[in-house]
């Protein structure tokens, strides 16, 4: 199974440790095409030898070839929002994970979208068991 994992890069790297744990868990089910999202060497500046156009077309190819899309949406990111919308358009099965945070709410464009599954979680354990039932 090809799994596309989306998480914030230039939107902010605060949740990278969480991405790393989720990606590690996802590797039990198949190939995670976007492991770099959880790579601590990649900063919010997103420095790379690839051009922006190369990143965009490579990520879209991966998105198109994925079987499921899992997005961690707690740190707002334009790129993640864009990928979620594209995935929905491509009729992919999409799970968005959102960590409950006092005084914050996930975007209505995610919460109100009937074509994706949104799971609001408190602990990593909850998030991972949601991933398990989504994939199974
Ligand atoms: O707007 P953001 O940068 O927060 O968007 C993050 C999302 O877009 C992630 O889920 C990635 O799939 C995708 N994305 C954004 N920037 C990159 C990127 N930058 N490389 C790969 N995917 C990206 C350059 C870093 C490079 C060294 C790997």
Image: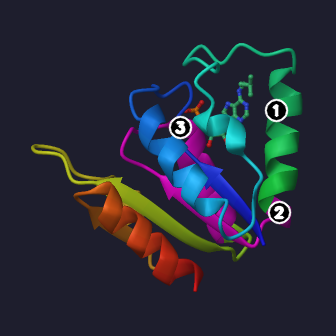
Observer-nearest of 53 and 118: 118
Q: Earlier in the sequence, mark 3 or mark 2?
A: 2
Q: Which residues are magenta?
A: 64-88
Colour scheme of the picture: rainbow
- The secondary structure type at the circle numbered 3 is helix
Residue placed at 53% from the left, 37% from the top? 78
Ligand 1 placement by image quarter: top right
Which badge, 2 or 1, comes first in the chain's sequence? 1
Q: CA distance from mark 1 to mark 3?
A: 14 Å
Q: Which residue is mark 1?
A: 55
Q: Nearer the viewer, residue 101 or 123?
A: 123
Q: Does residue 115 appear anywhere in the picture?
A: no
Does mark 1's beta carbon lie closer than 8 Å to ligand 1?
yes
Q: Circles 3 and 2: CB distance less than 8 Å?
A: no
Residue on which disc 3 sits: 78
Q: In the rendered image of this protein, does residue 65 appear above or below residue 73? A: below
**Label drawn at residue 115:** none
Q: Nearer the viewer, mark 3 or mark 2?
A: 2
Horizontal side of residue 103 vs 69, given as left or right: left
Query: Which residue is most to the bottom?
Result: 136
Residue 84: percent from left, percent from top: 58, 57
Badge 1 or badge 3: first in the primary sequence? 1
Q: Name the secondary structure under disc 1.
A: helix
Mark 3 C-beta to ligand 1 under 8 Å:
yes
Residue 104, quarter of the rendered image = top left
Quarter of the image with the N terminus is bottom right
Q: CA distance from mark 3 to mark 2?
A: 19 Å
Give how far across and how far down residue 64 sits, in percent. Answer: 83, 62
Q: Is residue 61 magenta?
A: no
Q: Residue at x 71, y 13 (%)?
A: 47
Q: In the rendered image, which residue does mark 2 sit on?
A: 64
Q: CA distance from mark 2 to mark 1?
A: 14 Å
């Amino acid at each position: 199974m090809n799994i596309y994992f989306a998480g914030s890069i230039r939107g902010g790297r605060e949740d990278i440790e969480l991405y790393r744990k989720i990606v590690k868990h996802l590797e039990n089910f198949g190939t995670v095409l976007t492991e770099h999202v959880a790579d601590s060497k990649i900063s919010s500046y997103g420095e790379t030898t690839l051009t922006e156009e190369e990143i965009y077309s490579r990520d879209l190819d991966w998105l198109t070839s994925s079987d499921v899309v899992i997005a961690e949406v707690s740190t707002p990111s334009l790129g993640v929002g864009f990928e979620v919308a594209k995935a929905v358009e491509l009729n992919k099965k999409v799970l968005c994970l959102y960590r409950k945070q006092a005084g914050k709410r996930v975007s209505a464009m995610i919460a109100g979208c009937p074509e994706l599954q949104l799971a609001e979680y408190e602990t990593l354990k909850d998030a991972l068991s949601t991933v398990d039932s989504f994939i199974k």
